[in-house]
Image (tube, rainbow, N blue to C red):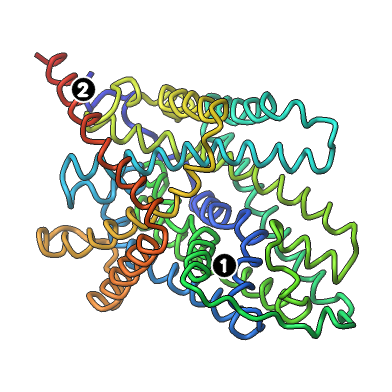
Amino acid sequence: MSNNDPRLRPKRVLSSGFTLAVTIGGIIGLGILRTPGEVAALAPRPLLFVSLWLLGGLFALLSTIVAAELIAMTPRSGGTYSLVRRAYGPFPGFVIGWVDWLSFVADIALKAVVVTEFATLLVPSIEAWQLPLAISISTVFAALQLLSISLGAKIQQIAAAAMAVIVIGFTLALVFAPPVSGTVADAIPRADRSFGAWSLVIASLIYAYDGWLIAAYFTGETKGGGKAVVRSAIKGVVIVILLYMCLVSALAWKSPLGSLVGSELALARALEITVSPLAASIVLVAAIIMTLAYQNILYLSTPRIIQAMAVDGLAVKRAREVSKGGNPVFAVLLTWGLSVGLIIIGGFEFLLHLAVFFHLFVYVLLIAGVMILRIRQPDADRPYRTWGHPWTTLICLFGWIFLSLFQAVVQIETALYAAIMVVLSWPVYRFIIRSGRSRSG
C-alpha cells in the first residue's frame, strides 16, 4: 500500500472550534480539582499560592508560543512525534512516539479506573463491579471513535463548554460564599519547603496545565492546517489561565488553604467548608463528568500517534489506515487493547508516576527541536515564527531541562524506571525495522 492510498490520507473535517475545545478540555481536568492541596502544602498563604499558579500558566503559554513554530510548519497529525521527527530522525522520533503513546494509553486506563472510584464514593454498592465498569468505560469511548471523528468532535465541543461552566460555577460559589469564621480560617500551617514538597508542587502544576499541546495531534485533519491550530492552541491556553486564576484566587481568599493540604479533591474540601457539606458530592459528580470528557480526548488523540508512526514505517502497517469515518480504526483497537490490559493488570500507579518524567522528556526534545530546525533548515517555510526567538526558546528549553533534572534528582528511583522504559524502545524499533525490510524484500 503506497502513501498515496486514500486510506492513509485523513480528511480536513475539523474546525478551529474543535481545536479550541480540545485545548481547553485537554488542559482542564482533575488537576484543578485535586492539585490545589499539594500546592497549598508549600504555599499556605494566598499571595504565594496564586503566584505559583500564575507562573505555571505563563510558562505553559510561553511553551505553546515556542512550539507553535513547529505546529505551523507540520501539516500532519500525530502530536509531538510528527513535530520533532524531522529534527531528530527515525529512531529518536520513534522513542518520542513510543513514550508519548504509552503515556496516553496508561492515562486512558487510569482515568477509567478513577471514574469508577468516584462513582463508588457516590454509590458504594457498585464497588464489586469496579473492574468491569472500568473496562466498559474504555470500551464505550473506543467504540465512539470507531463510528466517526465528527461524533467525537461534537462530544468534545460540548464537553469543553461543560468543563468551563463547571470551573466558572465553582468560582462563583466560592466568591459568594460567606466568610469562614473561627480558628480554622485563622490558622496558617507551617509551609513544607523541602525538596520533596517542591518536586510535588512542580509535578502538580505540570499535571494541571498539561494538555497545551493537544491540538497538534489533529493538525492534518483541521481546516486551515497548522496556522489555525496555532491560533486555537494559544487562545485555548489563555482562556484556561484566566479560568484557573479566577478559581484559585477565590479559593485562596475565601477558604483556609491549610485545610486543603492532603485532600485528594481539594476543591471539594474547600466548598464543603465554605458552602455546604453537600458540595463534596457535587464536586464528585463534576469530577466524573470531567474524567469522562477526558476519556474522549484521549481516544481521539492517542491513536493518531501510532497512526503517524505507522505511516513512516515505525509501527504496525495496518495502523496507517483511516476509515470512512475519519479515524485510524486499527490504531484505535491497539490503543483500546493495551488500555484494557493495563486495567486488568492493575499497574496504573507505576505508570502514573512515570507520566511526569515522560512529559518532561518530550517537552525538552520538543523545544530543542525548534532550535535544531532553525539551524538545519533556515530556509524552510515557517507560517508562524516563534515570538522573541531565540531568547524565548532558550528560556523554555532551560526551564524544562531544569525541571527535568530537579525531578530526576529528587525522584531518582522513578527516573531510573523511566530511563529503562526508554532503553526498551530500541529492541522494539529494531524489530519493526527488520520486519518492514523482510516484508518489502
Is disc 1 surrounded by few (<14), some (14 to 19) or many (20+) residues within 10 Å? some
Q: Is 346 on the left or on the right of 412, as rendered?
A: right
Q: Residue at x 71, y 75 (%)?
A: 257
SS at badge 2: loop
Quadrant placement of the N terminus: top left
Looking at numbered disc 1 in the image, what kind of residue is underneath it? Ile
Q: How many marks?
A: 2
Horizontal arrangement in the rendering, residue 395 relative to residue 336 (left or right)? left
- Residue at (85, 76) in percent of width and height: 176
Which mark, residue 331? Answer: none
Kind of residue at badge 2: Ser
Q: 150 or 329, which lies in front? A: 329
Question: Compared with residue 125, is residue 388 higher up or lower down, i.e. above or below?
Answer: below
User: Could you say which is closer to the camera, residue 224 or residue 258?
Assistant: 258
Which quadrant is home to the C terminus? top left
Mark on residue 2? 2
Please state the horizontal and vertical placement of residue 369, each as a whole percent of the image.
22, 58
Q: In the image, is residue 280 above or below residue 9?
A: below
**Residue 338 x, y percent position in the rendering:** 47, 27
Location of residue 259 with respect to 72 vertically, above or below:
below
| Residue denoted by label 1 | 239
As rendered, which of 51 and 344 lies closer to the eye?
344
Which quadrant of the figure has residue 275?
A: bottom right
